[in-house]
Image: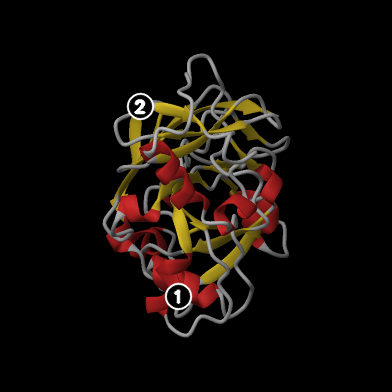
Amino acid sequence: MQLLRLGDPGAERPFVRSAGGVLYDLSPLTADIDGAFLAADGLSRARAAVEAGELPSASESGQRVGPPIARPGKVVCVGLNYRRHAEETGAPIPDEPVLFMKAPDVVVGPHDPVLVPRGSTATDWEVELGVVIGKTARYLDRPDDALAHVAGYVISHDVTERAYQFERGGTWDKGKSCENFNPLGPWLVPAEDVGDPQDLALSLTVNGVVRQQSTTKDMIFTVAEVVHYLSQFMVLRPGDLINTGTPEGVALGRPEPKPYLRAGDVVELEIAGLGTQRQRVEQA
């Protein structure tokens, strides 16, 4: 099952695609795919409605694909969470997850343009497994409890401006929260349909050249460990998004001159079972 939102920015409507590939209008069940829907056992209710034939069929033709969840309450990110990525950037393997935040309003659709900020010299790509919270997680006792709080998984593109991130002082957030810096989707896939989140292949190409190709097996901190860890410092609420880190192959880790994104580039991302994204890079 896949949950998605179609329509113009700010006017998306909810839909669900069955395992057989049929698209259904989810609006008889909910006004949107948001935290309230997820908290109210929305994924199970959507599945039951599809199986019972209670939803009208629909067509995706010609419609923009929006982010599969309405604007999250927060976007929490983990840096340096793949061993080979830490190695390529010359960073030590962290003892604890490296955390930063992205502004929630940078979340856009999976095929919306990536905007190079004005004055940018180092806009970089990062394919990531996105985790969407479905049940409030607060001071979880152990990692084994964590996955029960996950609604599902998505492809997340954690676009980053490296000069802003490392050369302008302060926190990483300023290099992470530029306009359109988090394409998301195309779908939210329920956790029960994904299985083991530590066994997913992920890849990214720029202009058809493979830049990232790895697996979530290379994560330093697993999804369960990340959710458990975060719950000790903040309350994770339904609809919140966690970006779990990127594998090796970013522009930052390449020899000079580093091939940072420029207007006209095309970036394509894929995670096994979660679909694909395609963005054209434009100047802001």
User: Which one is nearer the viewer's eye here, 42 or 13?
Assistant: 42
Residue 133, image x, y percentages: 53, 60
Residue 41, image x, y percentages: 51, 56
Q: Which mark is residue 208?
A: 2
Label 1 vs label 2: CA separation? 32 Å
Q: Quadrant of the N terminus?
A: top left
Left or right: residue 186 compared with residue 104 = left
Left or right: residue 110 compared with residue 233 = left
Amino acid of disc 2: Gly
Which residue occupies the extreme top position in the image? 62
Upstream in sequence: badge 1 or badge 2: 1
Check whether the beta carbons of the residues at disc 1 and disc 2 lie within 8 A of each other. Answer: no
Q: Label 2 crowding class (10 Å Cα cut-off): few <14, some 14-19, many 20+?
A: few
Residue 60, image x, y percentages: 48, 20
- Disc 2 is placed on an element classified as loop
Residue at figure coordinates x 57%, y 56% from the top left: 40
Left or right: residue 264 compared with residue 72 = left
Residue at figure coordinates x 41%, y 45% from the top left: 48
Q: Quadrant of the C terminus?
A: top right
Residue 221, image x, y percentages: 39, 71
Is 48 above or below relative to 221? above
In the rendered image, is residue 232 in sight?
yes
Q: Which residue is mark 1?
A: 94
- Disc 1 is placed on an element classified as loop
Which residue occupies the extreme bottom position in the image? 141
